[in-house]
Image: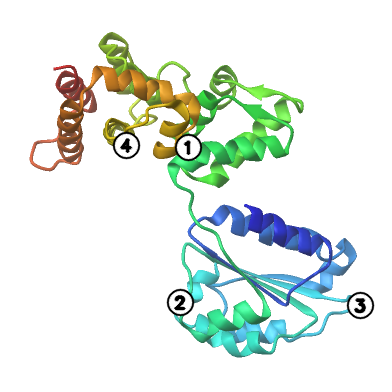
Amino acid sequence: MDEVKQIVKEIKEKQLKPVYFLMGEEPYYIDRIADFIEDNVLSEEEKGFNQMVLYGRDVSVDDIVSNAKRYPMMAEYQVVIVKEAQELSRTIENLERYVLNPQPTTILVLCYKYKTIDKRKKLYKALKKNGVLFESKKLYENQVADWIRRVLSGNNYSITPKAAQMLVEFLGTDLSKINNELDKLKVIYAQGKEFTPEIIEENIGISKDYNNFELRKAIGERDIKKATQIINYFAQNPKDNPIVVTVSLLHSFFIQLLKYHGLTDHSQKSVASALKINPFFVGEYQIAARNYPMKKVSQIITSLREIDMKSKGVGAAALPQIDLLKELLVKIAA
């Protein structure tokens, strides 16, 4: 995120590079940088003749170079943006000759999503020398809640840890989807607002009481009655609560709990650092550790793997989601 801010800052200050090669598994930042260049480098009057958007599936590297070598008309620069440049992965190395001697009045932007180029090849070295080479890495799930908090903080909003976790569990690690939902909330609420689980439930449609976050908490507390209510709700809404997501989250939770048992320092700060979790959630692990000794945790992890296989039809006839979740609860509670 700091690297993105620095790139944007330099563009604002007109410290422009002739080539921006934006690559990596996370498309969100690639789009943000490309959109910023598209919206801000040229004036509206200049864009008509001096800004073009190409698509990798429709052009060749030679086409891109040919367009990049044109001179701007009545403007200091022209901007050429190539979206879906990953479609040119087989021939992208042919861009190296242009990057070594780029047209100084052209700003060439390549959006190379979901892939990276070989760092051992000449193109990589040429881009490092003459342009901006940015790799947008996918965030791990345990990093996304903090990303949500920082994005909102930068816009003078805040969010409770539980509300952030609800968004992560419902939307996963897709930053573009999450940002779209945050944008909706920012339209509805004035700056300074703290987003709570109630606000998330009301405006995004995620239940604050019946979700994977609450299921994990109920199981950690050995509140089987509440856990049963939640899985019954899941059974009525299977499309919004796929078993693969539930099992994955519970598996991660018990793996973390196993790590917790192996710690010598169980203070909040130490646990949060070791497990890479928000300190707000440390209490859940402390309670769960009292309810599930290390040996039991290992057994539950094995059961979760078995349920995961069954849910995929491996080693057993396909069973309804509710039956598998009930079987899992029985094994956890045993």
Q: Nearer the viewer, mark 4 or mark 3?
A: 4
Instruction: Report the front residue among 242 and 195.
Output: 195
Residue 325 placement: quadrant: top left
Q: Which mark is residue 118?
A: 2
Q: Which mark is residue 74?
A: 3
Q: Position of residue 296 (x, y in %)?
A: 17, 26
- Could you give the CA–CA distance between mark 3 and mark 2, rounded to whole angstroms? 38 Å
Q: Are marks 3 and 1 in contact (CB under 8 Å)?
A: no
Which amino acid type is marked by label 1?
A: Leu
Residue 60 visible within the image: no
Q: 79 above or below 231?
A: below
Which amino acid type is marked by label 4?
A: Ser
Q: Secondary structure at mark 3?
A: loop
Which amino acid type is marked by label 2?
A: Asp
Residue under label 4, please give it.
252
Q: Nearer the viewer, mark 3 or mark 1?
A: 1
Instruction: Please give left or right for residue 85 compared with residue 209 in the image.
Output: right
Q: Residues within 10 Å of mark 2 (few under 14, many from 20)?
A: few
